[in-house]
Image: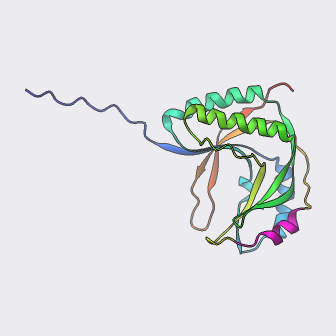
Amino acid sequence: MVAAPAAAAPCNCWRVRLFAAIDPSPDAVARLAAVADGVRDDVLRWSDPAGWHLTLAFYGEVGADQVDELTQRLTRVARRHPATRARIAGAGRFGRTVLWAGIDGDGAALRALAGSASAAGRRTGVGTDDRQRFRPHVTLARARGRDGADLRPYVARLESYTGPWWDADAVTLFRSRPGGPGHGPRYEPLARFALTGRR
């Protein structure tokens, strides 16, 4: 007699697209949005100011069984790193595809925090081992076509911008969801970690 196959264990197979970031203050967002409105056009696909953030680490698709571990590791990261001051200032581009506004502040502190957030992902088994130079920025717009666009005029109009200082005192774990037709992704905060380390 052949034994019936054992019932398969329930699969926790759902996956979510996650990243860790710092939110600018509402005042910083509002002031930059007012300036960006004077540059905005239909040539580029402009991001929603409500979703502006400083990405520290991108984790990509994360399994349900990994979210708790990632959250625990980010909790430990936040306990080791102190809050710092930051402001949005200047502008730049990544080739012909991405227009961004820069972040001023303690560059060493932000790089260290980004490195720890990335390491938390690697130890959880998510994210990439891409350790390219961290460039703190807020993505403002993307080119619409495959060939990109000449972003230099936009950079020239925004590069003298300097916004107010704010306290970068927490890291947020975000879920990225696809937007509707013609819209960029939507970002849903899943957890927030206060930066409580000592200087």
Q: Nearer the viewer, residue 112 or 41?
A: 112
Q: Position of residue 26 (x, y in %)?
A: 82, 49
Q: Please tell me in which quadrant of the rendered image residue 124 appears.
A: top right
Q: Residue at x 81, y 70 (%)?
A: 152
Q: Position of residue 14 (x, y in %)?
A: 46, 42
Q: Please tell me in which quadrant of the rendered image residue 59 appears.
A: top right
- Main SS of the magenta part reads helix
Q: Note whether residue 192 is visible.
A: no
Q: Residue at x 59, y 59 (%)?
A: 179
Q: Nearer the viewer, residue 80 or 111?
A: 111
Q: Nearer the viewer, residue 172 or 98?
A: 98
Q: Residue at x 87, y 68 (%)?
A: 157
- What residue span does the magenta drawing correspond to? 149-159
Q: Please tell me in which quadrant of the rendered image residue 199 appears.
A: top right
With 35 as the anchor, is 40 left or right in this view? Answer: left
Q: Position of residue 137 (x, y in %)?
A: 78, 52
